[in-house]
Image (cartoon, rainbow, N blue to C red):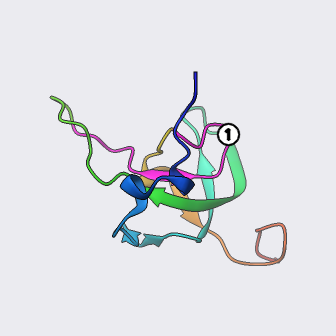
Amino acid sequence: MSHCNPANDPAVINGIQEVYGLKRGDKVEYTNDYGVKFAPRTVIGFVSDPPETDYEYTRMVYINSDSPWFPVDPARLRKIEGNEDGYANH
C-alpha cells in the first residue's frame, strides 16, 4: 500500500502557503498525544479540503515525520528557531 507524500502532492499544497501562523518550511516542535516531543520537524504542507465529517477536523498540517501522509493538529506544534539541531540556545 502506498501513502500520499504531501510534499510531492500539488492537490495538498497548491495555493496554501500559511495556516494558523505556520508556513511551509517552518521548523517546529511536535508534541504527540502522549506528551512526547519531536524536533526539529519541518512544515511541508497543509490539508486543502478537510473531509466532511460530523466532528471538527483539526489535523491540518503535514510535517516531515515517520508518517508524512498523516496531518497533525496545529495546536500540537510550536515554532522553533535556533541552531542546526532546531533548538534555541539557552
Quadrant in the picture for the N terminus: top right
| Residue 81 pos. (x, y %) | 68, 77
Q: Give the prevailing secondary structure in the magenta stretch.
A: loop
Name the residue carrying label 1: 36
Q: Is residue 85 magenta?
A: no
| Nearest to the observer: residue 88 or residue 41 | 41
Question: Vertically, is 77 above or below 58?
Answer: below
* x 51%, y 39%: residue: 4
- Relative placement, left or right, of 19 versus 29 is left
Compared to 14, does 1 lie above or below?
Answer: above
Could you say which quadrant of the image residue 41 lies in? bottom right
Residue at x 56%, y 45% (from the top left corner): 5
Q: Secondary structure at mark 1?
A: loop
The C terminus is located in which quarter? bottom right
Q: Is residue 40 left or right of residue 46?
A: right
Q: Which residues are magenta?
A: 56-69
Q: Residue at x 63, y 62 (%)?
A: 42
